[in-house]
Image: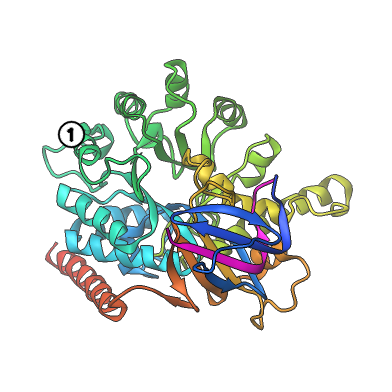
Amino acid sequence: MRRTLIRSATVISMDEAIGDLGTGDVLVEGSRIVDVRPSIDVAADTEIVDGKGRIVIPGLINAHMHTWQTGLRGFAANWTLLEYFRRMHAGLATVFRPEDIHIATLVGALNQINHGVTTLVDWCHNNPTPDHTDAAVRGLIESGIRAAFFHGSPKPEPKPGEPHFSEVPHPRREVERLLAGPLADRDGLVTLGLAILGPHYSTLDVAMHDFRLARELKLIASMHQGGGPAKTPGGWENLIEAGLVGPGINIVHGNDLPDELLDRMIDLGVSFSVTPENEMIQGHGFPITGRLLKRGARPTIGIDLESVLAGDLFSAARVALSMQRALDNAESRKASGTIPATTTIPVREALRWITTEGARMLGREHQIGSLTPGKLADLAIIDATDLNLHPVHDPVATVVMQTSLANIEAVMIGGAWKKRSGKLLAEGLETKKELLAQSGRRLVQDIERQGRAA
């Protein structure tokens, strides 16, 4: 069995029993971590990785991203949420071919690995045909990333005689097809979840159907909450009364949830995914990070849209942390005339949002999210000798507040290296980049032609 020892590194395990090691070793056998401690003796045939000057962390978990938009990077940077609905979902999304979905998902996932992300929640809601869905799943598998493929549904403007998307239940047959085929393994590298409409974007009948489908098939049901008035006022109360809200329900955004409803959701075990940068850019409102923390809950963090902003999860965590500290500081000034005596949120808390909390949201905390013996060997190595990180006084602060793509030296997923010596281990990367560029250009040209024809 293949063995790898990362020796004499600074280890941030995110495991409370192990803690942080100023100088420590991480031993990997096959796909799993088998030991984490200050010094480990190994057999002669073990691969030794010199960890001096490096920080080893659990692989990051990106809890929410629409990876199918990678070929449109930056195209929506100046759009509000209302423009995004009109110009992306009712516009550009309608001209995607399966090959566009495939190359966008493949390159988007590779970019996440490059940034130190080992698990990606791919919230795919542009899959009008099974071919589109299969193209996305194939892209994730080819990338080598660990992923939760959240199967969604497109949101075009209905043609005459067609129902509005809010009136269309999630397609059971398609979900069952995926569970019987490429995503049959519940513990596989790529697993299945549901990206449903939820009561904010669907009728009550559709919401009831989709929640029951997720519960029956034992799948996580994730949904957007926010962005204008709800399609079904009082929908959440009806779903709670029906006993359908609890663990396995994931809310994305949630900016406008009233306090009483937020309290009930937290008590029922609902998880929350915050995409702080995009929420503030497009007009969702302030992220609910602080509202969750005050109630003893924690968010997970996602990128959301590379069509708007960069796919850097460290930046997203910093934005969430900085924004909430700013709100807390302002609240303190208003109440007492001065800022708090100490910070309201330590940097380690933000690291939890992109590691252990992401694992918990996916129900996989027993497998990923920390450097714990027995868990899957998903990890990232940061070169702390780089000019922008040296010297390191507080390793956790260095990781959260100063690390960027430039510092990710190596990434391992399931015991296999996906990045080494600062280079992504992906064949034909230049060809893939060109295919992505061609896809993006064609999508923009096609939608422009449609606009002229109309």
Quarter where residue 194 is shown: top left
x%, y% of residue 226? 46, 42
Q: Is residue 341 left or right of residue 155?
A: right
Rendered position, 391 above or below 42: below
The kind of residue on which mark 1 rests is Arg
Rendered position, 154 above or below 94: above
Rendered position, 447 above or below 220: below
x%, y% of residue 222? 41, 39
Identify residue for label 1.
173
Look at 61% across and 70% down and name the residue there.
403
Quarter where residue 80 is shown: bottom left
Identify which residue, 379 or 158, lies in the foreground: 379
Q: Is residue 177 left or right of residue 354?
A: left
Look at 30% across and 27% down and name the residue there.
213
Rendered position, 308 above or below 33: below
**Residue with the most extreme bottom position:** 387
Q: Which residues are magenta?
A: 1-16
At label 1, counting other C-alpha atoms closer than 10 Å, the crowd grade (few under 14, some 14-19, many 20 or more) is: few
Look at 66% across and 70% down and name the residue there.
402
